[in-house]
Image: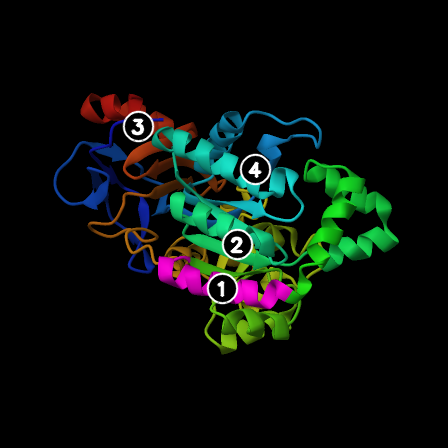
Amino acid sequence: MSTAPLSLRLTGATVLRDGALQERSVAVAEGRITKGPLPAVDLSGYLVLPGIVDLHGDAFERQLAPRPTAELPLEMALRATDREAAANGVTTAWLAQGWSWEGGRRGPDQAELLLRALEEHGPRAASDLRVQLRCETHTVDTFDRLLDTVRRHRIDYVVFNNHLSEAAALAESDRDALAHWARSAGGTPDAHLRAVARAQAQARDVPRYLCRLAEAFDALGVRYGSHDDPDGETRETFSMIGAKICEFPQRRAAAALARAVGDPVLMGAPNVVRGGSQAGNVAARDLIRAGLCDALVSDYHYPSLAAAAFRLVDEGLADLPRAWAMISERPAEIMGLADRGRIDYGRRADLTVIDPRNRAVEATIAGGRLAHLSGGAAARFLAAGGEALALAAE
């Protein structure tokens, strides 16, 4: 929305600061949380919360291909994803792009196209958009290409996942489901089966491949983890090679193992909102209730992030400061981002403004710039007049 950093003070709101809801103002200047007298915007009755940090989202796949055979330009998809994220309070987001034997929209070629498109879009982005690579374990022949891509595009987050056994099982039991999977990746069922066979042939080399990648990621400072761990043994194996982030464990045992060895656990916010996993895996709320979940991510639906935090409050599983920390402060800590996730002096000015009456995100400030403005909050900015009005309108 705005191209110039704001220089103003948000007054009258209830602000989440120092782990508590407080009645105080928040000053923003030069992209940071600051102090001092500045033009004021009265946000009495609103909540001002830290901007959301989303560690895993693949909603951009829907923007890229609204239907399996209807693909749109990457720049258009990124622009739509960027705006959707900002409209839901997200100020930092990792787009979860596949690096898979599947090829098509989840293959290395597509990953490199996305990374180049994002570099072009980045300067115009409303939010801080990054890419997480979802590396299928049976991609041994891409070792050099993967590391070159990680270096060139400064990738800071990779997760390992293994969906090969699922694909092989579908080939035997449910050809219709396999065909749907192939189409969603942008391929055909026959090509998908050939890709499965090629990947299966790499099985004996996978352990060494993962260890070599882990060593290289450590040297590059890349954070890495695993996705969809089916059991505690699998999580333990990944943890032992350094893949410390546990994303979407399918069973409680995997989350419990992660907690036992100090690995953070991420679950999908839609899982909380819907009351369970759409794939029949462990319910996020059960893990949260048991103290086995550290952070929530958008997965496939940005609006679920804020909604999940409020759902946890409504169900008595957390107060708002703790629930909101699961989508802001804790994800920032997991990724080592000391400049965001909390509202504090000198930190990046990432703010989410919410009307508590309907819990709608009405304003998002990302890096001190207006990324989204709507509803009653827009009227408040307009009513401020003067310098605040000029800056908000840019």
Instruction: Look at label 4 and name its amino acid.
Output: Gln
- Mark 2 or 1, nearer chain start: 2
- The answer to whether residue 294 shows anywhere in this view is no
- The answer to whether residue 87 shows anywhere in this view is yes
Residue nearest the observer in this picture, 261 or 380: 261
User: Which residue is rendered at x = 57% and y = 48% of the image?
Assistant: 99
Residue nearest the observer in this picture, 343 or 319: 343
Distance Cα–Cα, label 4 vs label 2: 16 Å
Coloring basis for residues: rainbow
Residue topped by disc 3? 381
Give left or right: position of 18 versus 174. Answer: left
Circle 4 — which element?
A: helix
x, y (%) of residue 289?
56, 68
Estimate how packed mark 3 is, as few (under 14), some (14 to 19) or many (20 or more) residues with alpha carbons within 10 Å.
many
Question: Which region shows up in magenta?
Answer: 205-222
Say which of marks 4 and 2 sits in front. Answer: 2
Say which of marks 3 and 1 sits in front. Answer: 1
Labelled pair 2, 1 in contact (Cβ < 8 Å): yes
